[in-house]
Image: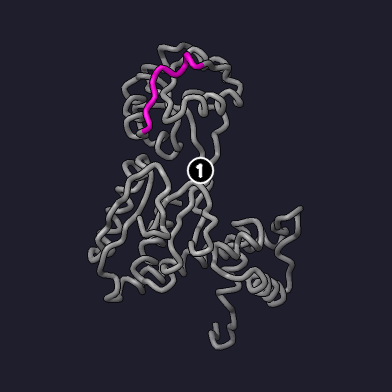
């Protein structure tokens, strides 16, 4: 191939990829820190360059056309390659030395982040990581942390956010405890179980009853605001608990309480201050976490 004849603009492909993932130009513009008209021009330019229509409008959002579906996987591969190239380049820079603080919930900090941070330390030992563990949202604008793992999208214009994945929470119990409950075929069978509420029992009660479980306050004899403690109680057979399926499915001492029950969806966002665009160390850690958590 004669590379001198190739005139492909990665910014346009990135605009296409992020717009497809976010579902609208406005959401994609916020995620990339661009003005919406600028992003729209990049998508239009890519469509003209390729000679295809990539999106069709559905209500207030956008949906991939058949041509868009054919191309989106190629754009994802390009994005992953660009991320790896970026992390490699950042790793050669002296500005990598220093501290980065990461805020996450106790469950994520204790059960998902350690193996990712272990690999981060191997990849770039000059970075010192401070883990800020809290189940409330850290204020990034006040620099309570540099990067945060959140389950909601921030509205502050000075923050940069990337949606990592759409996660699912499920109910789990220890193998022995579930065996003691007898056969569980449908949601209302779980009325025989005890549940460990991670916070306000009334909130979880209302959520689960929308799945047809027919629970009462008597089903919640235990309450614990610490997810790690709650999860330990679940593993000891003290009741059912709700947690990210990525965590629950990896624990051999428990299983899904009702495998056929649909998961309760929630998003996982990675958030940082806009300074990340000027700080190579923060950008390296941000991209490393995004790759490990997705």
Residue 210 position (above or below residue 125): above
Residues in magenta? 217-225
Of all residues, the one furthest to the front in this rendering is: 142
Residue 22 position (above or below residue 167): below
Where residue 197 appears, as percent x and y from the top left, is: 43, 26
- 285 lies left or right of 165: left
Of all residues, the one furthest to the bottom in this rendering is: 4
Residue 47 position (above or below residue 26): below
Where residue 78 appears, as percent x and y from the top left, is: 52, 67
Q: Residue at x 37, y 71 (%)?
A: 279
Q: Residue at x 30, y 58 (%)?
A: 120
Query: In this figure, which colouring scheme has been used for the structure?
Result: one colour
Q: Residue at x 49, y 31 (%)?
A: 170
- How many numbered markers are drawn? 1
Residue 195, quarter of picture: top left
Task: Work out whether residue 171 or residue 269 is closer to the camera in this orientation and state it.
Answer: 269
Where residue 101 appears, as percent x and y from the top left, is: 32, 57
- 240 lies left or right of 5: left
- 284 lies left or right of 73: left
Residue 287, quarter of picture: bottom left
- The residue identified by callout 1 is 167
Residue 130, quarter of picture: bottom left
Q: Quadrant of the N terminus?
A: bottom right
The kind of secondary structure element at disc 1 is strand
Callout 1 environment at 10 Å: few (<14), some (14 to 19), or many (20+)? Answer: some
Q: Residue at x 75, y 60 (%)?
A: 56
Where residue 7 appears, as percent x and y from the top left, is: 59, 83
Task: Work out whether residue 155 or residue 110 is closer to the camera in this orientation and state it.
Answer: 155
- In the rendered image, residue 218 lying in the magenta stretch gets the answer yes
């Amino acid at each position: 191939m004669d590379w001198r004849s190739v005139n492909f603009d990665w910014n346009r492909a990135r605009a296409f990829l992020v717009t497809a993932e976010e579902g609208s130009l406005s959401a994609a513009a916020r995620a990339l820190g661009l003005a919406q008209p600028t992003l729209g021009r990049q998508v239009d330019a890519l469509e003209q360059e390729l000679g295809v229509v990539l999106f069709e409008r559905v209500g207030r959002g956008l949906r991939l056309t058949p041509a868009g579906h054919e191309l989106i996987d190629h754009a994802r591969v390009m994005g992953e390659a660009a991320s790896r190239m970026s992390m490699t380049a950042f790793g050669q820079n002296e500005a990598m030395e220093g501290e980065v603080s990461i805020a996450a919930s106790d469950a994520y900090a204790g059960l998902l982040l350690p193996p990712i941070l272990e690999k981060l330390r191997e990849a770039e030992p000059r970075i010192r990581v401070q883990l800020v563990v809290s189940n409330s949202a850290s204020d990034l604008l006040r620099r309570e942390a540099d990067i945060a793992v959140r389950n909601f999208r921030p509205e502050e214009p000075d923050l940069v956010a990337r949606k990592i994945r759409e996660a699912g929470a499920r109910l789990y119990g220890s193998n022995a405890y579930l065996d003691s409950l007898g056969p569980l075929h449908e949601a209302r069978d779980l009325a025989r179980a005890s549940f460990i509420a991670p916070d306000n029992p009334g909130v979880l009660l209302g959520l689960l009853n929308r799945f047809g479980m027919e629970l009462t306050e008597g089903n919640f004899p235990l309450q614990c605001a610490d997810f790690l403690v709650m999860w330990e109680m679940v593993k000891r057979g003290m009741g059912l608990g709700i947690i990210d399926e990525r965590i629950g499915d990896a624990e051999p001492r428990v299983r899904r309480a009702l495998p056929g029950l649909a998961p309760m969806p929630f998003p996982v966002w990675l958030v940082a201050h806009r300074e990340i665009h000027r700080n190579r160390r923060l950008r390296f850690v941000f991209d490393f976490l995004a790759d490990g958590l997705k």
